[in-house]
Image (cartoon, grey):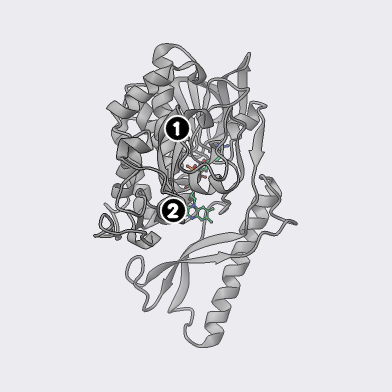
């Protein structure tokens, strides 16, 4: 057994966990980032989900700022892709015309590694979180396993950025589950295609929800079946292309298949408040930032701080896919730009809570809002950007 202690411990190095770890480390705290794979980026890189969805409302106004914008720009440092030139002039813009990019997953990994190095985060790859120790209702330590054996990582505050709310579950907390459709994003070489880099593109396989396999939530069976079925579907697509005579195995072949299950909704926190469908354009007194709906221009959401807290387990904040949202609202909060945004907020809140010697639910909202408005330069309410709910037609 090995033992270590940090001010802030973040589980999961997807975009949410990285934003959280960087935000806390930039505030001078000791931060550990625990990741079961050997890559940074989670679904965005291991899952080959390579579209950084919009930071703008589709009508020329940027609504999300901070590390999420920094990550979008850095995703282009070591690879191709461009921010659409005229996104500010567009009205009712299609998604591809908005402030978004398509990036190379490997390039993004390099950029994310660099952000973590610069911030001084202690990254633990190949380290699976397997258990949680509580002191009363407060999360006090995580059990991990890696090549050194089993260990205990204690912390003053934790961020659950596992995408699946693993910390909440391991701590015995309630979580909510969602359903999934079969998906698989594969990076392939396709002669004559110039979409991502020369002759490379991301092929997407998808199929309708299968309740037999994709039961709500997550299980060993769900993960295994989703991976096996998506790869089978991709093999069938290749065979069809070869049979058509348009391509052969030297002009069309996979370069990289996803290294994690392409599941969208697994488990989110049972929080004091959850975002529900239809809550776009709702003002929340505890808003921590704004998110644009990537599917339709002109829909903007305020994100309440309460969606990052757990109803029973103290000392842990949700980030990214783990934040509390249901149904259609989860479609908005789960995507890369919003996951990075809630990640940054979780890291800031964790840092402020540790400094104040309190758990995150006792952190005064005014203190958090002051830091988000001041140092992070976040707009917190629609009115900060002069936005208002469009009149009903
Ligand atoms: C099929 C599909 C298509 C999508 N398309 C898009 C798109 O086009 N654009 C977009 O913006 N978003 C898209 N998304 C959503 C987006 O990719 C993710 O929701 C987002 O990247 C989630 O980030 P995250 O950091 O919250 O979680 P994740 O990316 O899931 O990261 C969680 C990390 O935690 C690690 N982890 C998990 N459990 C443990 C544990 N017990 N111990 C240690 N580490 C652990 C994982 O290995 C992973 O690295 C898509 C998602 C899917 C599934």
Quarter location, residue 365:
top left
Label 2 secondary element: loop
Q: Nearer the viewer, residue 80 or 239?
A: 80
Quarter location, residue 64:
top left
What distance separates the C-alpha of mark 2 from that of mark 1?
A: 29 Å
Q: Which mark is residue 294?
A: 2
Residue 210 locus on image (x, y percent) = 70, 59
Q: Relative to residue 168, is residue 16 depicted above or below?
A: below
Q: Quarter holding the N terminus? A: top right
Q: Is residue 32 visible?
A: yes
Residue 282 locus on image (x, y percent) = 47, 38
Q: Relative to residue 242, is residue 371 depicted above or below?
A: above
Residue 150 locus on image (x, y percent) = 58, 28
**Residue ID at (57%, 49%):** 328
Queried on whether the Cβ of the residue with tag 2 lies below 8 angstroms from ligand 1, the answer reads yes
Residue indicated by mark 1: 33
Q: Earlier in the sequence, mark 2 or mark 1?
A: 1
**Residue ID at (32%, 70%):** 198
Residue 329 locus on image (x, y percent) = 54, 45
**Mark 2: few/some/many CA within 10 Å (<14, 14-19, 20+):** many
Queried on whether the Cβ of the residue with tag 1 lies below 8 angstroms from ligand 1, the answer reads no
Q: Nearer the viewer, mark 2 or mark 1?
A: 2
Q: Nearer the viewer, residue 39 or 341?
A: 341
């Amino acid at each position: 057994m090995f033992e270590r202690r940090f001010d802030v411990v973040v589980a999961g190095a997807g975009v949410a966990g990285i934003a959280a770890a960087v935000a806390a480390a930039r505030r001078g705290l000791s931060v550990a980032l625990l990741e079961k794979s050997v890559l940074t980026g989670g679904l965005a890189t291991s899952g080959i989900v390579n579209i950084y969805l919009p930071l703008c409302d589709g009508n020329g106004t940027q609504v999300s700022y901070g590390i999420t914008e920094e990550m979008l720009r850095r995703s282009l440092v070591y690879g191709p892709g461009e921010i659409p030139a005229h996104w500010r002039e567009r009205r009712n813009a299609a998604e591809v015309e908005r402030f978004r990019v398509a990036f190379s997953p490997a390039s993004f990994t390099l950029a994310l590694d660099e952000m973590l190095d610069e911030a001084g985060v202690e990254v633990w790859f190949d380290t699976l979180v397997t258990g949680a120790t509580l002191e009363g209702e407060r999360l006090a330590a995580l059990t991990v396993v890696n090549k050194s054996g089993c260990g205990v990582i204690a912390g003053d505050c934790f961020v659950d950025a596992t995408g699946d709310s693993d910390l909440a579950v391991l701590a015995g907390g309630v979580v909510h589950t969602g359903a999934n459709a079969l998906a698989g994003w594969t990076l392939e070489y396709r002669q004559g295609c110039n979409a991502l880099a020369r002759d490379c593109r991301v092929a997407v396989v998808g199929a309708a929800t299968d309740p037999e396999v994709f039961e709500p939530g997550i299980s060993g069976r769900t993960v295994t079946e989703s991976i096996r079925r998506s790869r089978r579907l991709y093999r069938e697509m290749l065979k069809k292309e070869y049979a058509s005579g348009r391509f052969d195995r030297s002009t069309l072949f996979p370069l990289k298949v996803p290294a994690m299950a392409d599941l969208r909704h697994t488990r989110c926190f049972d929080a004091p408040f959850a975002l529900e469908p239809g809550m776009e354009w709702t003002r929340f007194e505890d808003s921590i930032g704004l998110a644009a709906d990537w599917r339709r221009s002109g829909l903007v959401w305020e994100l309440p701080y309460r969606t990052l807290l757990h109803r029973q387990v103290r000392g842990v904040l949700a980030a990214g896919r783990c934040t509390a949202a249901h149904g259609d609202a989860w479609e908005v909060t789960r995507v890369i730009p919003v996951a990075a945004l809630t990640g940054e907020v979780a890291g800031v809140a964790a840092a402020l809570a540790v400094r104040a010697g309190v758990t995150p639910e006792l952190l005064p909202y005014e203190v958090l809002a002051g830091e988000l408005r001041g140092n992070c330069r976040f707009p917190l309410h629609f009115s900060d950007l002069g936005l208002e709910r469009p009149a009903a037609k």
